[in-house]
Structure formats: structure tokens, C-alpha cells
Amino acid sequence: MTDTLAGAVTAPMVRAWIEKSAKVLADNRAHLTELDSPIGDSDHGNNMDRGFKAVLEKLPQGDDIGAMLKSVAMSLISKVGGAAGPLYGTMFLDGAKPLAGKTSLTGEELARFFDDAVAGVMKRGRSDVGMKTMLDALAPAAKAFREEIANGSDMPAALKAAAKAAEQGMEATIPMQAQRGRASYLGERSIGHQDPGATSSYLILQAFSDAVEEAVQ
Amino acid sequence: MIGIVIVSHSRKLAEGLKEIADVMSGQPVPIAAAGGVDDPENPLGTDGIRVLDAIREVLSDEGVLVFADIGSARLNAETAIDLLEPEEQEKVHFCDAPLVEGVLAAAVQIGAGSPLQAVMREARQAASQKAPAPEAPQDAQSGGVTREFTIRNPMGLHARPAALLVTTMNAFTGDIRLANLSKGKKPVNAKSINGIMLSEVTADDRISVTADPAEAEPVFAAIEDLIRTNFGEEAAVASRPAAAAPAGAPPPPETASPAVIASGQLDGISIAPGFALGPLHHVRSTLPEVEPVEITDPAAETERFTWALSDAEAEIRMSLAGAGQRISAYDRKIFDAHISYLHDPEIIETVTQRIAGERICAAAVWRDVVAGLARTYAALEDPLLQARAADVIDVGQRVLRFLSGGETSPAVVGEPSVLAFEDLRPSDVLALDEKSVLGICTMTGGKTSHAGILASALSIPVVFAVGDALVGIEEGEQVLLDGTAGTIFAAPDAETIAAMEKDRKAWEERRARAEAVRKLPARTADGQEIRVAANMASVEELGVVAASGAQEVGLLRTEFLYMRRDSAPGEDEQYEVYRTLVTGLAGKPLTVRTADIGGDKPVPYMDRPAEANPNLGWRGLRYSLGVPEFFDVQLAAILRASAHGPVRIMFPLVSTLDEVKAAKERLRAVMKELQARNLAFDENVEIGLMIEVPAAAEMADVLAPEVDFFSIGTNDLTQYVMAADRANARVQDLFDPFNPAVLRMIARSIKAAHEAGIWIGMCGAMAGSPVAAPILLGLGLDEFSMTPSDIPEFKLTLSELCLPACRDLAEDVLKLSSANAVRDRANFLLGR
Ligand SMILES: Nc1ncnc2c1ncn2[C@@H]1O[C@H](COP(=O)(O)OP(=O)(O)O)[C@@H](O)[C@H]1O
Ligand SMILES: [Mg+2]
């Protein structure tokens, strides 16, 4: 029984993930804003909180995972306001494209979701790993997840590894010099600060891991 | 029209920028502001869905340009574009330009009718500090004709005057360069708003203008006209009494010389065509004097004032509702601006405080405040803001009427009259009853003012800027207003009246009848149908052509694709253009003429050798065959468009059979290549050639079996048959297609075409001439392709002709010995 449950991500799990993300981002609103103040414009916390509040309001009923994630994308594009809006929006939109009508996802499908999501952010932001952005958390997470699935890990374990990789990626942004976004305007002065976008990415992935973990228990 | 979307973090910035652009563009350009996010506490940011909606709001086939401010606005703009449907997406372009300068430059350029590429280029260059380098090398200008002018209006070529110049220059097809000689500036493109602005032409500067010899005369005449009329609005500024003339400024221009007044005729600018005869009625357009009356109850007076404001607003809203379809959404915005004055907290505050403090009546305080405000506006340097003075006075008067109780609307008169205004206000236009007002004339004002735009849509004649001499015409005096010519006669004599009456009747009747047949099939009185087609030379004309009554496009000149750019357009870019046209024509055939670029039209990247005799040089099909990599790209693009609807390919300047065969050879090769690339096209696409070289007309029987159709280009054919340069004024009497020599060439070509079983059209200027119509019809021409605006009159002329009479006429004129004799004979048949 645990096997089937642990081998797939179901629609209720995705819903729980989205709801948990909203909660975590609300809880970390001040923290994110604080991270955005030395190397940005002190709005990332407010942006993400406002965006995910709108996400919850608009989230459709039912078990269509593709539709849910697409709705998340549209709300973020409309309501985040800053760069994170189109970036996370494109991430969910591109990731969700192959998932229309699906009510549960296999490891392979979810790995593909992460890959598409990362590719979407890269395309939208014209950015890559190492530029001190959310990608530094997202890309290692996608890679770790795929490896875990390939090695036969179950879903909770793979997601946990992904969140761990995101956390390390987030921390790795501290010594980096920003090459994209507002922080890049600061040049060398951006060194020594953790990137707010990478932080919110980590929080969202950790929320995913926690939500699935709770569901299978 | 091309649309603009403004994406900004700030809603206020987006809307404010839209407001300036609306006013500056001259023409109503569709602009949508998409700024800010829906969060009252943190309103700065961008909302991708709002951008998406904004794009759709202004989207048309002509395309949309999206501008954004900083970083993430661009990300959201691009996200919104990605969210569009693919067929919408291809029309929407992100324009990487500085927001404010870019949007303003684009709006002006769109208003002036420039194509999308030019608009984008102008927008991108908008903030560059130095004047853009001249696009053509200096020596390429040697073929142009140059004349010098002195700019006299006090503002020089800034803002609206610059926009007006660009709009006027855009009506010409050739390259036009302007250089500020006084400031030693390099020549710039006279169709570029940035170029003009950066030339910093101020009052009394000398400029030189260089134009294509073929159109130099009309270009210069148009510039002289602009200078004479002080670029439309400047006259309004110079003679507005409220505006104190800055020290040292030149005196207001004389708007009418004494000699002109003596003859009773005043010249102005034509705003709306038509004729009117009737008594002149002067309409007062300044604020009336109001006696300051002491009051005892400031609170009650303030309340009266508040009521007057809301009554004025209600009145504006009512007349807007009453005007219904007569005014567009854009025009409505003008009145929205009026309403916003009624809500201006600063004005209200000032008035309220003064009522309480000085204890005088609201009417006097209001008049004082409004007059002061109007003066401030009128004294400003920026002509855009100056124009606001009229709006302020307009609103001010309206409120005064409510405060002082009952004075009637200014434009109401007893007997039908011609109304004379100092300066027409937007609300005057709205309040007009077109049945009791015969016509309108003003002392000042420009085509592109709010009132000018509104008045141009009226069905009565309107003439602006006839000058201060208008006050000299007495109240009630009989005047004759000619809206078409832009003149007014005071006390016309019986003869002038009779002439005008005749003109007017004929003009009105004819126009109505021509409009009535515009959309009907082109048919003679005895039922012979022919094909009426339109000529086109840019994508922007699609709307005009679609509404013109043409059943096909007989000539698409493709030179526009190559002009004013750094490199030749690639296959995909050309394909997009042709496909847009084919789709837009919705089944009406599109005849695409391959490029006819010669030494007379410099295209820098083509790197052509200078020619002593460009008209007899390496142009048209000759060039295309000589540069196959250039030719193949165009052929491939046209062919690919043929997958989307009926397309014909036509070769220009054919002289020999070998050329036709070589061109067809290339076409076959390109078809093979497209097949190999798996790209769709119509294998049976019709192929034709232009008859414009005498050799082709003479050998038409030999050429005909090779193609599906001919099209006669009368301009070049005439110039070559008569050996008369079309740009040389001294030989213009020879350059006349009615010469029997030219007509015989035409007759021969038509006969050869029909003997070979193919159809033949004409796409030169002659095709739209009503006088030529019976001759060409009699000769058997199958298709007449003309400027869209010629179509109604052409169809009407046709409907009055009978084929046998035309055949007789055609046979006769070929035997005549001069162009004038031919014309007389044709006019006789037409009863003119
Ligand atoms: N071009 C980009 N590619 C990837 N991520 C980016 C890019 N630009 C910004 N970001 C991410 O967005 C975060 C900032 O988001 P936010 O504060 O909401 O936007 P803004 O910078 O507009 O205020 C940054 O910390 C960074 O992670
Ligand atoms: Mg920020």
C-alpha cells in the first residue's frame, strides 16, 4: 500500500503542496524581504506572499494537476509584481504543460516537470546556474530529484533529496556575484548576501517535500 | 493602425505617458496603459495579465509594439506575449527602447502612417544623443533636388510642428532629407520625428530639403504650405490675445495680405470639404466679464459652485451621449479631460477659499481662476500645453453659464449661418447642429488640434486659420465658404456665387453617387463588367484597400521592403509581409511585383555602381536576374505566401523574351527548393509581366505565350516611348500617356494578349483616370488597377459608358495626331 502511495504524487498532494507553500511564504515574508533589502528593493517577501494569496483564491477545485499548476502560474504572473512573477509564472506554466488532465504523477513525470520548470526560468530570465538567482536552488533540486528516481528511491525520499539540494544551492548563492536581476546592479557589492529568490525557491521545494511526507504517513 | 502598449511599474507613469502620447500623435493612435499591480499598499510592479489584456485591447492586423520600463516589466511583457495565441503573437513585438522617448516617438510615427519597421527603428533611436547618421551615403543624394527654406514660426520644428512635417512628408514615397544649415547639422530623414527634433530647428533657421526629382516639386510646395500656415498651430499661439509675446519674439505672422482682403478672399487650411453660402455669425469664444458681487453666505455660495460643477459635468455627459456614433472613443477622451478639470482639487480648493476669504460671488472667482489658468497655459513654451488653454476656457464657460444662470449655448443661432470662431473649441463641435450650421471658419487653429480632429469628421465645410482679417467681416454679411480649397469669400459677387453653386451641386451630387457605387461590381451602362483593382505600396494600406471597393490588388510595389534599412529583408520577413497581405485581403488576389529598384532610389546595402542614366540602367528584372541570391529570396517568400490565398507574380521592366525565360527558370528552381524544404506553395501561381518598355509592347505577341497576364505600366511606358524624363519639368508636355503613340503601344499589347488568350491589366496612373476610361475600355483592357481613392469616381464613370461607343472612340483616337485631340474627343463622349 505504502508502495503505490509512495511511488506517485497525487492531486491532493499537489494541492497540499500549494497550500503549504502559501503558508510558508507568508510565515517567511519578513525574512525574504530582509534578504531582498541589501541586494534588491525589499519587496520579495511581500511579492511572494501577495502572489500565493492570490494563488489560493483562484485555485480550481478537482483533481486535474495540470489545471491546478497552470492556475498557480497565471495568478503569480498577475499578482507577484516583481521579477519573480513572470519567472515563477513561466516555471509553473512550462512545467505544467505536459500534465494537463493528469490526476497523479509518476517519478518520471515529476522529474520532467522539474526539468521543464527549470528550462522555463532559464528561458524567461535569460539566466543560468551560477548567476545568483533562484536557478541556483531550482536546478540542483531538479537534478537531484532525477538521480534519486533513477536510483529507485521512492517519492518522499526523492523530494527530500531535492529540497536538500535546493537548500545547499541557496546557501551557495552567498559568495556569488549577481549577474541577473536588481542585485546585479550592485556588482561586487552583491557578494556576501543570500539571494532572496533562491531562498523562496528552497522554501517552495521544502514545502513540497513536507507535504508529500505528511500525506504518505 | 499599429497599437502601443505601455508596461510600467507605475500605473500613474503608464497613464500619464499615454496621455502625452495621445495628444502628440496627431492622429488617434490606439494606446493602452498597463502599469502597476492590484495592491493599494504596494502599487508598484507589473501584472502580466493586465499586459495581456492591454495587448488584446489595441491588437489589429497591423501589429502592436510593447514598451516596458525597468527589468522585470520587460520579463512580464515577454511573458504576456508568450501567453497570446500564435496567430496573435506574430503581430506583437517587444520594442527595446527607452520608455518615455520610445513611446512618444512611436506614437508620432504611427500617427504619421509609417510602417512597423520604421516605427520600431525610430522608437529605438529615440533617446540617442546625437542625430542619427544619414542612412544614405552623401553621394547617393546627388540624384536629388535640393531647395532651401527659412523656418519662421517661433517654436521652430518641435513637438507638433515636427509631427506635422513628418506626417506631411510621409505622404511622399521617395527619400526626403532635411538639414539644418544654420546649425550645421547633418542631413536627416525628413520622415523621422527624431531626426527632425534632433536637428534643433528654431525660428529663423535655414534648412535645406533634398527630395527625389520625381516628386521634388510637390514636396517643396507642401513645405512652403506648412511654413505659410505656420505649421498649423503656431498661428494659434502667435495671435492668441491672452498669450503675452515673449520679448524679442518676432511679431505674429500676417495671416492675410491687404491685397487678398481687397479681393474679398481669405485663405486658410481645409479641414472638411464642401461648399457653403450664407450669413456669417461671429461666435464669441473668450470668457465673458463677470462683475464681482459681494455675498454674505460663503457656505451657500460654495454649495452653488459645487452644484454648477456637477451640472456642467452632467451636461458634458449628456451631450456625449447625444452625439452617439458621431464621435469616436478617442474623441470622447477629450471630454473626459474636460470633466477632469471639474474635479481638479487644486482649482476647487482655490475657488472655495477665495469665496470664503474675499466674500465675492463664485462666478467672479471662478472666472478669475480659469482666466489665470488659461493664461498660464497659453504662455507656456510647449505648444502641447498651450493648446490646453482652449480646453480650460471651454470648461470655464460652461461652468459660468450655470453659475450666472441661463445663457444659451454659444453655437445656437437663429437662421442657418456660417459660424466664425476665433478658435474652435472641442465642445463647439459637439454642440453643433449640422442642419442649422452651414459651415465653420476660424481665425486660428490647426488640423491636429482637438477641435481640428473633431471638425474634420463633420459633413459641413470647415476652414481653419484664415487669420485675423476674419473679424473684419461684418456680422450677418454674406460669405462663401469653400472647404475643399480652404478659402472664404466675403460679399461674393453674383458671378462667384453662381460658379460656386454650380461647383457645389456637381460636387455633392457626384460624391454621393460615386460613394453609392463604390462597393458594387464595376459595370458599364450596357452591362459589361471589368475588374477594378487597387495599387498598394505598404502593409499599412491594407485597411484602405479592403474598404475601397477593389476586387483585387493589381499591383503591390515591393520596394518598401528594401528601403530605409541596413540590409535586405530575409525570406521569412518578406514572407510574413506577403502572408499578412494575402490573409488580410481575404480571398482577393494579390499581384506582387518583384522589386524594381534602380539607381534613382539609393539603397545603401545594395552597393550599386553609380549610373549616369538610372532610368535606362540596371533596374527592375535586370537587376533581379543579375543578383540571383536577391531574386531567389523574394521569389521564395512570395511563393510561400501563395499557400495562404491567391497570389500572382509579376516581373517589372521586361525587355526581351530571354529575360522572361530566365526569370521563369529562377522561379522553377526556387519552387524545387521549396519542395525540398517541404514548404507549401501554389504550384499554379499566375505569372505575368509588366509592359513598360517599348520593346516589350512591340514584341508582346512573342512574350504572351510565356505568361498568364500582362500589366501595362503607363508611367514608364510613356517616358520611354516619348523619350521624356518624367522628372524633367521642361519636357512635361511630352510626358503624357494620351499621346497617340503611347495609346498605339497599349492597343498593340492588348491585342497581342487577347490573341494569345491571356488577360491584360493596367497599373499606371492612367488606369484611374476617368478620361482614359472609355478609351481603355474600348481597347479591351480587362483590369484597371488604381489608387484606392480613385475607385468610386472610376466606377461611377464606368457606369455611364456603353461599350460600342467606347470601341468607336478607341478606334478613332488611335488615328488622332495629338494628346490634346485625344483628350478632347474622350471628354466629348463623357459629356464634360
Ligand atoms: N533574470 C533572472 N533570472 C532568474 N532569476 C532572476 C532573474 N532576475 C531576478 N531573478 C530572481 O528574482 C529575485 C527577485 O525577485 P523580486 O524581488 O520579486 O523581483 P524584483 O527584482 O523585480 O523586485 C531575485 O532574488 C532572483 O532570484
Ligand atoms: Mg525585489
Image (spheres, coloured by chain):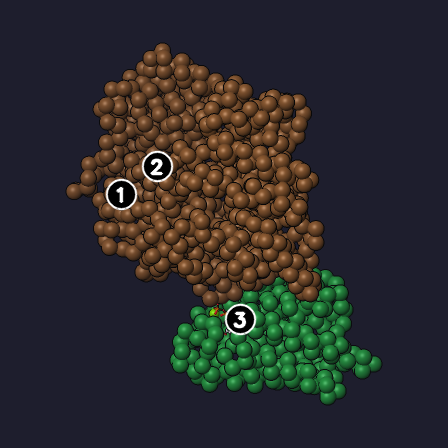
Chain colours: A green, B brown
Mark 3 is surrounded, within 10 Å at the Cα level, by few (under 14), some (14 to 19) or many (20 or more) other residues, namely: many
The amino acid sitting under disc 1 is Phe
Element type at marker 1? strand
The x and y percentages for residue B60 are 57, 48
- Residue drawn at x 64%, y 28% as measured from the top left: B523
Q: Residue at x 25, y 33 (%)?
A: B239
**Residue at 40%, 42% in the rendered image:** B725
Q: Name the residue beneath numbered marker 2.
A: B730
Of label 2 and label 1, which has the lower sequence position? Answer: 1
Q: On the rendered structure, is A139 left or right of B212? A: right
Chain bearing mark 1: B
Residue B41 in view here: no
Quadrant of the rendered image containing residue A16: bottom right
Amino acid bearing label 2:
Arg
The circle on residue B149 is 1
- Identify the amino acid type marked 3: Gly
**Mark 2: which secondary structure?**
helix
Q: Which residue is drawn at 31% across and 35% down?
A: B229
To which chain does the residue with label 3 belong?
A
Tell which tag, 2 or 3, sits nearer the viewer. Answer: 2
In depth, the one of B549 and B635 nearer the eye is B635
> To which chain does the residue with label 2 belong?
B
Residue B273 seen in this snapshot? yes
Residue linked to disc 3? A125
